[in-house]
């Protein structure tokens, strides 16, 4: 397995997907291995089999570059611990769903703005080195507040009433 950084390519359209993206830092885990029960065939449903996981998690220029504090980036040790827990407790059958769960964890729990997850069953078949899946996900962009539409006279009156002020009724 190639574990060199040269095997990593960042998302091709990250700048287009994340406006204002000046720099992205990537925290990665490659070659995480563990055994878990996963699969759809009868032979896979009762005993653990090995998986190899690569996770690349993008951050918009991690503050840790300036502060040198682990709290300002993704702690890959914590991610590994979370992966161990997921492998022990999940009830998923497909590698696609398993990879999606990892992506959800990276984005939802660790604050990644982008993630690439590769999950491999090594030597699943005697004539194949590995089978697996690779997915990429991006965190949802923050929703911009809707611009306030101009109010009609009735809308303006209702807003005043709602604020506790009653307009002069022209008497």
Image (spheres, rainbow, N blue to C red):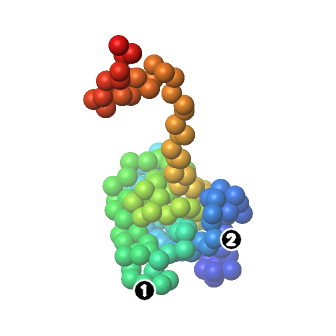
The total of numbered circles placed on residues is: 2
SS for callout 1? loop
Report whether residue 94 is seen. Answer: no
Given this view, does label 2 or label 1 mark the residue nearer the observer? 1
Residue 147 at x, y = what percent? 54, 40
10 over 41 or under it: above or below: below
Labelled disc at residue 9: 2
Q: Residue furthest front?
A: 171
Circle 1 crowding by C-alpha within 10 Å: few under 14, some 14–19, many from 20:
few
Q: Residue at 45% across / 80% down in the picture?
A: 64
* Residue that numbered label 1 is attached to: 68
Closest to the observer: 129 or 63? 63
SS for callout 2? loop
Residue 79 at x, y = what percent? 41, 69
Cα distance between the residues tagged 2 and 1: 25 Å
Classify residue 21 by image quadrant: bottom right
115 over 143 or under it: above or below: below
């Amino acid at each position: 397995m190639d574990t060199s950084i040269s095997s990593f390519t960042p998302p091709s359209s990250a700048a287009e997907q994340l406006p204002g993206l000046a720099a992205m830092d990537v925290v990665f885990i490659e070659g995480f291995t563990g055994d878990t029960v996963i699969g759809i065939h009868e032979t896979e449903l009762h005993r653990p089999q090995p998986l190899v996981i690569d996770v690349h998690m993008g951050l918009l220029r991690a503050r840790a570059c300036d502060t040198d504090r682990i709290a300002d980036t993704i702690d890959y040790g914590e991610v590994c611990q979370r992966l161990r827990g997921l492998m022990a407790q999940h009830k998923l059958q497909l590698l696609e769903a398993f990879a999606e769960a990892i992506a959800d964890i990276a984005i939802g729990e660790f604050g990644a703005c982008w993630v690439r997850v590769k999950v491999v069953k090594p030597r699943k078949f005697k004539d194949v080195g590995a089978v697996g899946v690779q997915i990429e996900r991006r965190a949802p962009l923050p929703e911009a507040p809707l611009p306030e539409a101009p109010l009609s006279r009735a809308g303006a009156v209702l807003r005043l009433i709602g604020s506790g002020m009653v307009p002069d009724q022209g008497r």
